[in-house]
Amino acid sequence: MKSTRFVLFIAVAVQALTSCTTVIDAKLDTGPIQLSVDGTLTDQPGQQTIRLTQTAAYFDNSQPTPATSATVTVSDDAGKTYPFSDPDNDGYYVWQPTGKDTLGHIGRTYQLTIAYQGDTYRASSKMNRLPPIDSIIFVKRKLNPFSKTEGYRGEFYAVDLPGSVDYYRIRFFRNGELQNKPENIITSQDGGFRGVNNVTDGLTFIAPIRRSINPDSLYALNDVVKVELQSLTADAFDFWQALRTQITNGGLFATPSVNVPTNIINTNATGRKATGFFITSAVRSKTASVVQANIRVRED
Protein backbone atom coordinates (compact mmCIF):
# COMPACT_ATOMS: atom_id res chain seq x y z
CA MET A 1 0.00 0.00 0.00
CA LYS A 2 2.80 2.36 0.85
CA SER A 3 4.55 1.61 -2.44
CA THR A 4 1.31 2.31 -4.33
CA ARG A 5 0.93 5.70 -2.66
CA PHE A 6 4.56 6.50 -3.42
CA VAL A 7 4.11 5.70 -7.13
CA LEU A 8 0.97 7.86 -7.23
CA PHE A 9 2.85 10.71 -5.57
CA ILE A 10 5.66 10.53 -8.16
CA ALA A 11 3.13 10.43 -11.02
CA VAL A 12 1.34 13.52 -9.72
CA ALA A 13 4.64 15.35 -9.17
CA VAL A 14 5.87 14.61 -12.69
CA GLN A 15 2.56 15.75 -14.19
CA ALA A 16 2.73 18.98 -12.21
CA LEU A 17 6.25 19.69 -13.39
CA THR A 18 5.52 18.95 -17.04
CA SER A 19 2.08 20.53 -17.37
CA CYS A 20 2.50 23.78 -15.46
CA THR A 21 4.79 25.70 -17.79
CA THR A 22 4.79 29.47 -17.42
CA VAL A 23 6.38 31.60 -20.10
CA ILE A 24 8.13 34.59 -18.59
CA ASP A 25 8.73 37.50 -20.93
CA ALA A 26 11.72 39.13 -19.27
CA LYS A 27 12.06 42.81 -20.02
CA LEU A 28 15.61 43.89 -19.32
CA ASP A 29 16.54 47.53 -19.05
CA THR A 30 18.83 48.66 -21.84
CA GLY A 31 22.00 50.08 -20.34
CA PRO A 32 24.10 52.89 -21.76
CA ILE A 33 26.07 52.26 -24.95
CA GLN A 34 29.72 51.78 -24.09
CA LEU A 35 32.96 51.58 -26.00
CA SER A 36 34.25 48.02 -26.42
CA VAL A 37 37.94 47.41 -27.09
CA ASP A 38 39.44 44.28 -28.63
CA GLY A 39 43.18 44.74 -28.91
CA THR A 40 46.07 42.27 -28.74
CA LEU A 41 49.43 43.59 -29.89
CA THR A 42 52.36 41.22 -30.48
CA ASP A 43 56.05 41.19 -31.26
CA GLN A 44 55.40 39.61 -34.67
CA PRO A 45 56.21 41.47 -37.91
CA GLY A 46 53.48 43.13 -39.92
CA GLN A 47 50.52 45.34 -39.13
CA GLN A 48 48.82 45.45 -35.73
CA THR A 49 45.06 45.93 -35.29
CA ILE A 50 42.78 47.20 -32.54
CA ARG A 51 39.04 46.81 -33.02
CA LEU A 52 36.58 49.29 -31.51
CA THR A 53 32.84 48.65 -31.36
CA GLN A 54 29.81 49.79 -29.37
CA THR A 55 28.02 47.58 -26.88
CA ALA A 56 24.43 46.51 -27.55
CA ALA A 57 21.42 45.21 -25.65
CA TYR A 58 21.72 41.76 -24.04
CA PHE A 59 19.43 39.98 -26.52
CA ASP A 60 20.68 41.84 -29.61
CA ASN A 61 22.33 39.19 -31.82
CA SER A 62 23.25 41.54 -34.65
CA GLN A 63 26.83 42.43 -35.50
CA PRO A 64 28.23 45.10 -33.16
CA THR A 65 28.23 48.66 -34.43
CA PRO A 66 31.77 49.88 -35.29
CA ALA A 67 33.09 52.73 -33.17
CA THR A 68 34.44 55.05 -35.85
CA SER A 69 36.11 58.49 -35.85
CA ALA A 70 38.23 57.69 -32.78
CA THR A 71 41.83 58.76 -32.31
CA VAL A 72 43.93 55.74 -31.31
CA THR A 73 47.60 55.73 -30.35
CA VAL A 74 49.96 53.36 -28.57
CA SER A 75 53.14 54.53 -26.86
CA ASP A 76 55.89 52.58 -25.13
CA ASP A 77 58.26 53.29 -22.27
CA ALA A 78 61.13 53.68 -24.75
CA GLY A 79 59.59 56.94 -26.03
CA LYS A 80 58.04 55.64 -29.25
CA THR A 81 54.49 56.42 -30.37
CA TYR A 82 52.54 54.32 -32.83
CA PRO A 83 49.47 55.94 -34.46
CA PHE A 84 46.55 53.71 -35.51
CA SER A 85 44.11 54.68 -38.26
CA ASP A 86 40.77 53.33 -39.51
CA PRO A 87 41.20 53.46 -43.32
CA ASP A 88 38.01 51.56 -44.11
CA ASN A 89 35.88 53.33 -41.49
CA ASP A 90 34.84 49.95 -40.04
CA GLY A 91 36.19 50.16 -36.50
CA TYR A 92 39.41 48.27 -37.29
CA TYR A 93 42.27 50.62 -36.36
CA VAL A 94 45.55 49.60 -37.95
CA TRP A 95 49.22 50.42 -37.45
CA GLN A 96 51.38 49.79 -40.50
CA PRO A 97 55.15 49.33 -40.07
CA THR A 98 57.36 51.53 -42.21
CA GLY A 99 60.43 49.31 -41.99
CA LYS A 100 61.51 45.98 -40.55
CA ASP A 101 60.92 46.99 -36.94
CA THR A 102 58.06 45.43 -35.02
CA LEU A 103 55.75 47.28 -32.66
CA GLY A 104 56.11 44.83 -29.79
CA HIS A 105 59.32 44.18 -27.86
CA ILE A 106 59.67 41.90 -24.85
CA GLY A 107 60.18 43.84 -21.62
CA ARG A 108 58.56 47.08 -22.77
CA THR A 109 55.34 48.51 -21.33
CA TYR A 110 52.72 49.91 -23.70
CA GLN A 111 49.99 52.47 -23.12
CA LEU A 112 46.88 52.58 -25.27
CA THR A 113 45.08 55.93 -25.58
CA ILE A 114 41.66 56.26 -27.24
CA ALA A 115 39.83 59.56 -27.73
CA TYR A 116 36.20 58.82 -28.60
CA GLN A 117 33.06 60.95 -28.48
CA GLY A 118 34.48 63.41 -25.94
CA ASP A 119 35.96 60.75 -23.64
CA THR A 120 39.58 59.63 -23.28
CA TYR A 121 40.34 56.04 -22.36
CA ARG A 122 43.67 54.53 -21.37
CA ALA A 123 45.08 51.08 -20.71
CA SER A 124 48.58 49.73 -20.17
CA SER A 125 50.20 46.34 -20.57
CA LYS A 126 53.72 44.92 -20.39
CA MET A 127 54.98 42.48 -23.01
CA ASN A 128 56.35 39.62 -20.95
CA ARG A 129 58.85 36.92 -21.84
CA LEU A 130 58.06 33.37 -22.93
CA PRO A 131 59.96 30.23 -23.96
CA PRO A 132 60.05 28.63 -27.41
CA ILE A 133 58.03 25.54 -28.30
CA ASP A 134 60.51 22.71 -28.63
CA SER A 135 58.46 20.12 -30.50
CA ILE A 136 55.04 18.63 -31.30
CA ILE A 137 54.43 14.88 -31.30
CA PHE A 138 51.45 12.63 -32.00
CA VAL A 139 50.33 9.36 -30.39
CA LYS A 140 47.78 6.98 -31.89
CA ARG A 141 44.69 6.69 -29.71
CA LYS A 142 41.01 5.73 -29.72
CA LEU A 143 38.51 8.55 -29.52
CA ASN A 144 37.50 7.08 -26.15
CA PRO A 145 37.98 3.67 -24.46
CA PHE A 146 34.67 2.38 -25.89
CA SER A 147 35.07 3.76 -29.43
CA LYS A 148 36.35 1.98 -32.52
CA THR A 149 37.35 5.33 -34.04
CA GLU A 150 41.10 5.89 -33.98
CA GLY A 151 43.25 8.93 -34.65
CA TYR A 152 46.19 10.84 -33.24
CA ARG A 153 46.48 12.89 -30.05
CA GLY A 154 48.75 15.92 -30.28
CA GLU A 155 51.15 17.03 -27.57
CA PHE A 156 53.55 19.98 -27.55
CA TYR A 157 56.68 20.42 -25.45
CA ALA A 158 57.99 23.63 -23.93
CA VAL A 159 60.00 24.42 -20.79
CA ASP A 160 58.87 27.23 -18.48
CA LEU A 161 61.42 29.98 -17.92
CA PRO A 162 62.74 29.84 -14.34
CA GLY A 163 62.95 32.56 -11.72
CA SER A 164 59.52 34.22 -11.69
CA VAL A 165 55.83 33.56 -12.23
CA ASP A 166 54.98 33.50 -15.93
CA TYR A 167 51.51 33.43 -17.50
CA TYR A 168 50.66 31.99 -20.90
CA ARG A 169 47.85 31.46 -23.36
CA ILE A 170 47.95 28.52 -25.79
CA ARG A 171 46.20 28.54 -29.18
CA PHE A 172 46.21 25.82 -31.81
CA PHE A 173 45.30 25.50 -35.48
CA ARG A 174 44.21 22.44 -37.47
CA ASN A 175 45.03 22.67 -41.17
CA GLY A 176 45.22 26.44 -40.88
CA GLU A 177 41.94 26.86 -38.98
CA LEU A 178 42.07 28.31 -35.46
CA GLN A 179 40.27 26.08 -32.98
CA ASN A 180 38.28 28.70 -31.09
CA LYS A 181 35.51 26.99 -29.17
CA PRO A 182 35.06 28.19 -25.57
CA GLU A 183 36.87 25.11 -24.24
CA ASN A 184 39.84 26.04 -26.47
CA ILE A 185 40.63 29.06 -24.29
CA ILE A 186 43.74 27.55 -22.68
CA THR A 187 45.78 29.39 -20.07
CA SER A 188 48.70 28.30 -17.91
CA GLN A 189 50.81 29.55 -15.03
CA ASP A 190 54.44 28.40 -15.25
CA GLY A 191 53.43 25.57 -17.57
CA GLY A 192 50.93 24.20 -15.05
CA PHE A 193 47.71 25.25 -13.39
CA ARG A 194 47.23 28.43 -11.36
CA GLY A 195 47.71 28.34 -7.61
CA VAL A 196 50.37 25.64 -7.48
CA ASN A 197 52.88 27.86 -5.62
CA ASN A 198 55.52 27.77 -8.35
CA VAL A 199 56.10 24.02 -8.11
CA THR A 200 56.28 23.94 -11.92
CA ASP A 201 58.62 26.94 -12.26
CA GLY A 202 61.40 26.16 -14.71
CA LEU A 203 60.04 22.72 -15.59
CA THR A 204 58.52 21.14 -18.71
CA PHE A 205 54.86 22.03 -19.19
CA ILE A 206 52.71 19.42 -17.45
CA ALA A 207 50.88 16.75 -19.45
CA PRO A 208 47.32 18.23 -19.22
CA ILE A 209 48.62 21.51 -20.67
CA ARG A 210 50.78 19.79 -23.29
CA ARG A 211 47.78 17.74 -24.44
CA SER A 212 45.29 20.61 -24.45
CA ILE A 213 45.90 21.23 -28.16
CA ASN A 214 43.43 18.61 -29.39
CA PRO A 215 40.06 19.24 -31.09
CA ASP A 216 36.91 17.28 -30.24
CA SER A 217 37.91 14.66 -32.76
CA LEU A 218 41.42 13.24 -32.99
CA TYR A 219 43.88 14.37 -35.65
CA ALA A 220 44.14 12.38 -38.88
CA LEU A 221 47.22 11.40 -40.84
CA ASN A 222 48.75 14.35 -42.74
CA ASP A 223 46.88 16.95 -40.69
CA VAL A 224 48.97 20.09 -40.16
CA VAL A 225 48.97 21.34 -36.56
CA LYS A 226 50.26 24.72 -35.45
CA VAL A 227 50.66 25.55 -31.76
CA GLU A 228 51.03 29.15 -30.64
CA LEU A 229 52.27 30.22 -27.21
CA GLN A 230 51.52 33.77 -26.01
CA SER A 231 52.86 35.57 -22.97
CA LEU A 232 50.36 37.28 -20.67
CA THR A 233 50.31 39.64 -17.75
CA ALA A 234 48.58 38.46 -14.58
CA ASP A 235 45.62 40.75 -15.39
CA ALA A 236 45.28 39.37 -18.91
CA PHE A 237 45.44 35.84 -17.49
CA ASP A 238 42.53 36.71 -15.18
CA PHE A 239 40.61 38.19 -18.13
CA TRP A 240 40.89 35.02 -20.24
CA GLN A 241 39.95 32.79 -17.32
CA ALA A 242 36.92 34.94 -16.48
CA LEU A 243 35.86 35.05 -20.13
CA ARG A 244 36.00 31.27 -20.44
CA THR A 245 34.01 30.89 -17.22
CA GLN A 246 31.25 33.19 -18.45
CA ILE A 247 30.85 31.77 -21.95
CA THR A 248 30.78 28.18 -20.65
CA ASN A 249 28.46 29.09 -17.77
CA GLY A 250 25.32 27.09 -18.47
CA GLY A 251 23.31 24.05 -17.53
CA LEU A 252 21.70 23.02 -14.29
CA PHE A 253 24.44 24.41 -12.07
CA ALA A 254 25.02 27.72 -13.88
CA THR A 255 25.83 30.71 -11.70
CA PRO A 256 24.59 34.29 -12.23
CA SER A 257 26.46 36.06 -15.02
CA VAL A 258 28.96 38.75 -14.08
CA ASN A 259 30.96 41.24 -16.10
CA VAL A 260 34.45 40.13 -17.09
CA PRO A 261 37.27 42.45 -15.96
CA THR A 262 38.55 45.29 -18.11
CA ASN A 263 41.70 47.41 -18.06
CA ILE A 264 40.20 50.14 -20.27
CA ILE A 265 39.79 53.14 -17.96
CA ASN A 266 38.10 56.46 -18.68
CA THR A 267 40.36 59.28 -17.52
CA ASN A 268 37.20 61.05 -16.35
CA ALA A 269 36.01 59.10 -13.30
CA THR A 270 32.40 60.15 -13.93
CA GLY A 271 32.53 59.52 -17.68
CA ARG A 272 31.18 56.55 -19.62
CA LYS A 273 32.85 53.27 -18.84
CA ALA A 274 34.30 50.89 -21.41
CA THR A 275 34.52 47.13 -21.84
CA GLY A 276 37.12 44.82 -23.35
CA PHE A 277 40.82 44.37 -22.73
CA PHE A 278 44.14 45.65 -24.05
CA ILE A 279 46.73 42.84 -24.23
CA THR A 280 50.36 42.73 -25.32
CA SER A 281 51.83 39.30 -26.02
CA ALA A 282 55.09 37.95 -27.29
CA VAL A 283 54.34 34.98 -29.55
CA ARG A 284 56.24 31.79 -30.31
CA SER A 285 54.88 29.03 -32.53
CA LYS A 286 55.67 25.60 -33.92
CA THR A 287 54.09 23.66 -36.80
CA ALA A 288 54.16 19.90 -37.33
CA SER A 289 52.34 17.40 -39.53
CA VAL A 290 50.86 14.09 -38.47
CA VAL A 291 53.44 12.01 -40.32
CA GLN A 292 55.51 9.00 -39.28
CA ALA A 293 58.50 11.09 -38.23
CA ASN A 294 56.38 12.84 -35.56
CA ILE A 295 54.39 9.80 -34.34
CA ARG A 296 55.45 8.16 -31.08
CA VAL A 297 54.43 4.89 -29.43
CA ARG A 298 53.44 5.54 -25.82
CA GLU A 299 51.52 3.63 -23.19
CA ASP A 300 50.09 6.62 -21.30
Image (spheres, rainbow, N blue to C red):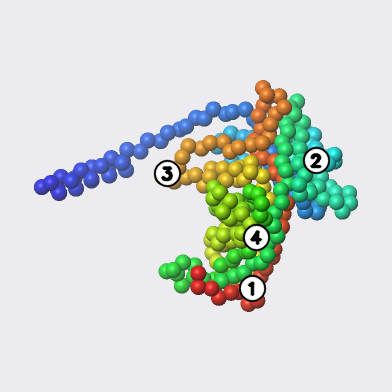
Residue 178 at what x, y percent from top left? 65, 57
- Crowding around mark 1 (Cα neighbors within 10 Å: few <14, some 14 to 19, many 20+) is some
Question: Does the residue at mark 4 contact the one at mark 3 (Cβ under 8 Å)?
Answer: no
Q: CA distance from mark 1 to mark 3?
A: 41 Å
Kind of element beneath mark 3: loop
Q: Which residue is mark 4?
A: 159
For marks 4 and 3, give the one nearer the viewer. 4
Q: Which one is earlier in the sequence, the residue at label 2 or at label 4?
A: 2
Q: CA distance from mark 1 to mark 4?
A: 19 Å
Tell me if residue 180 can be seen: no
Three-letter code for the amino acid on which mark 1 is drawn: Asn
Q: Which one is earlier in the sequence, the residue at label 1 or at label 2?
A: 2
Q: Which residue is mark 3?
A: 253
Q: CA distance from mark 2 to mark 3?
A: 44 Å
Q: Which residue is mark 1?
A: 294
Name the residue at 64% across, 73% down. Answer: 294
For marks 1 and 3, give the one nearer the viewer. 1
Three-letter code for the amino acid on which mark 4 is drawn: Val
- Position of 88 with respect to 165 (left or right) is right
Q: Is residue 40 above or below residue 154?
A: above
Q: Which one is earlier in the sequence, the residue at label 1 or at label 4?
A: 4
Question: Does the residue at mark 2 contact the one at mark 3 (Cβ under 8 Å)?
Answer: no
